[in-house]
Each structure stands twice: as structure tokens, then as C-alpha cells.
Image: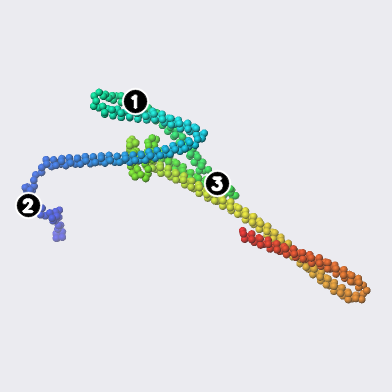
Amino acid sequence: MTERGIPGFITSHRSSNIDSLVVRVKNGLKSSKYKPVDYVQLQAITEAKKLESVNILLKIKKTEHAAKINKEQMLLKQHKRVWWTEHKRLHENRQKLESELQTFYDEGSECFLDLWDLRYKLSRDLDEFQANTVQPIWQLREDLRYRLLEMQTNRECPEYEFSPDAVVEEVEFVKKQQKVILEKLHFERVALEQELEEFTHDALICSSKDRTALMHEIPPQLLALECPYPDLKASVFAEFEKLADGYWLKVQEIDQELKDISSTFQWNKEDLWIYQVVINQYPKPMQGRRTLYLDMLQKLLPHKSREDLVAHERAWDHYHFTRNQWRTLMLNWIEARKAFLLKAVMTLAEACTSHETEIMLANNRRKQQEICADLREKVLQWRMQQEEAARLEATIAARRKEEQEEKEKLQKEKESLQRAQDKEKVKKYWAEKQRKWQEQEARDLLRLMEFKKLMAEQVIKDKERLLLLQNLILLE
């Protein structure tokens, strides 16, 4: 075996403990430095430690109990603060409603006579109820306080006799009276709750039907609008129906979800009412709101465990969240309906404007065609007048040529007949012929001048009409 194969010596002691280890080896196990164990003393020390730990545990429990009491007192103070705020709010609301009712009654109309009678009857019933329920309790309270004060004052007097049986009998009589009144009030409350429940159920059914009718009813603003295109108006109605159907399906889904959540509530109606009232008493921005209303619910509903309260809280939060979704959906439906109405009104208005523009363009096109036809007729008439003027000018030129030729012929005849004896007849004939030519020429010249004047006036009118037509086209 080589030197490398030899394992090293391993010890659990450190280098700093070598001296103490050597000393113990030198002294041995039976050395006088090691004393025997006193178990009685150890047991006494153990008992003392146990007693001390028990005292500490009692102190801890007392501290926890005191902390619990302080916590309860702090919670109670917070509850009182919330109750006082709620009482103040309800009192202010009551005063406000009473003042509004008083103002409403003071208007003095004949139709308010029945309301006055109902108000008087309710006030009389309230006074009678207070006289039968509240006043006996206050009277018994004052009587007990007086007797207690009298007993404390005459305690040392031997002649004073106090009979507690009469007091107990009086208290029991008031209790029985109050019990009968409370049972009667309970029956009346149950009857009123059933009546209100039936009324609420009928109102909900009617409101559901009304909501369905309102959501699918075409708004009267759309029905009152005029549209020259029936297909466009029908498409707008179809689009509104499509929008209403989409929102109605979402509303039905949320309503079904609310019904499913409500069916999961295993509490009775009174517990549900207490839970809702307590939850609404504590405002949401309040610090420690959940702790406070859970503590109050545990006091008002002792038969419900904290797990039941937390589970119902989750279900109630889900129901409240779904209810808020329903409200948001209805608000979105109102906004979408307003936006659709605005868009539909704008679309139909644009369609009416487009139709009017088309009608105006058609009228303008027809006017332009009439103007063009009139101008074409004027041009044809002007051409015919030009042709007539050219024909007249050609006739006048031919006549003048004929006259010249006739003059030349007569000149030749005159030259050839100079020596004829019939000069006088020739002169008369020439004079008559010349007169006729002059009259014919004068008539032709007058007709030509009138024709040229008529053509000049027609040209001026045509220029003015063309200028007016160009202005109309530029304005369009």
C-alpha cells in the first residue's frame, strides 16, 4: 500500500478544543470534578418554569381578551358613527320629502282633497299606534325608574315595603301587550310584503314587455322623416331592427345570468333584505368597510357562518357586477340609438338634398335643351333670312343689269330711230318705263332696308340671349 492510499485521521474536535479534551482524559470519568445529578431540584425548577409559562400564557390570553374587547369597542364606535350618519341622512331625506309634500299640498287644488284625507288618516293612525305601543313602554320605564329611586331612598326605612310581584306583573302585562302588537304588525307586514311582491312581479313583467316593445319600436322621428327613395328608408328601418335585435339578445343574456345568480341565493327574503340594508349603510370609500359590514352581519345573522357570509358576498358582488353590466348595456343602447337616429336623419337629409339636386339638374338640362332648340330655330330662321336677302340682292342686280341692257338697247334704238317721227311716243314710253323701274327699285330698296334692319335687331337679340345663357351656365 502506498502512502497515497492511507486515509487521513478524521476527528470532530476543533483545534481550539484540544486543551479541554486533554484535561478530561487526564482527570478520568470518576473524577471529583463531576457531581451527581439532583433530580428533585431539577423537577422543582421544571415546575417553576411550567408555572411561569402558565402565568405568561394567562397574561397573553388576558392581553388577547383585552385586545378583542378593544377591537369590539372600536368596531362598535365605528358602527355607531355609521349608524349616526345613516340616521342623519334618512332624517334629512324625510324632512326634505315632508317639505316637498307640504309644498305640494299647499298648492290648494280640488284634486288634492283625497290626498288630504289620506294624510289625515295616516297621521291619526300614527298617533294611535304611538299611544298603543310607544307610550306604554315609556310610561313603564318612568314608573320603574321612579320605583327604583324610591327603593334606594327608603332602603334604610323599616316601615317601607316594596312588592316586586306587582312590578313583575305590570312588566309581564306590557310584554304580552307588546307581543300581541308585534304579532299583528308582523302579519300586516307579511301581507304588505306579499302585495308589494305581487305588484313588483306584475310591474317587472310589464316593464319587460314594455322594454321589448320600446327596443323594437321604430322611433317616431324616423317615421316622420320624408325620403324620396322608399328602398333607402326600408333599409334604414331594417338596419335599426338589426341593431335592436343585437342589443336585445345581449339584454336577454344578462337577464338570464341575473336569474341564474338569483337562483343560487339560498337565503330567505328577510336575510337577503338585512344583507342589502347593511351593505348599503356602509359607503364604498369608507376605510375598513368590509370588516365593518361583515362584523355587523355576524351580529345580525348569528345563524350564518363567516364562510356563508363570504360565499354570499361573492355571489352578491357577482350579481351587482352583472347588474352594473346591464345598466351599462342599457346606457350603451340609448347612446347607440341616438347615434343611429342622428346618422339616419343625416342620411335621409342627404338623400332628399341629392334628389332635389337631381331634379334641379334635370330642370336645368331641360331648360338648356329648350334654349338650344330655340337657338337652332333662330339660326335656321337667320339662315333663311340671309338666303332671302341674297336672293333679293341677286334679283335687284339682275334687274339693274336688265335695265342697263334695256337702256343700251333703247339707246341703240334711239340712235337708229333718231330720224323717226315717233320720237314723242318713244319719249313717253321711256318715261313710263323709267318711272316703273324707279318705283320697283324704290320698293325693292325699301324692302331690303327693312329686312336688313330686322336682321340687325335679330342679331342683337341673339347676342343678348347667348350672353344670358353663358351667365346662367357659369352660375350653375
- CB under 8 Å between callouts 2 and 1? no
219 to the left or right of 297: right
Name the residue rendered at 50%, 43% in the picture.
215
Q: Which amino acid type is marked by label 1?
A: Phe
Q: In the rendering, at what x and y percent does residue 230 appear?
A: 59, 48
- Residue at image mark 1: 173
- Determine which quarter of the picture holds residue 6: bottom left
- Residue at image mark 2: 26
> Which badge, 3 or 1, comes first in the chain's sequence?
1
> Which badge, 3 or 2, comes first in the chain's sequence?
2
Q: Which amino acid type is marked by label 2?
A: Lys
Is label 2 in a helix, a strand or a loop?
helix
Residue 179 visible in rendering = no
- Residue at image mark 3: 222
Q: Which amino acid type is marked by label 3?
A: Leu
327 to the left or right of 462: left
Alpha carbon of mark 3 to alpha carbon of mark 1: how far? 72 Å
Name the residue rendered at 57%, 46% in the picture.
224
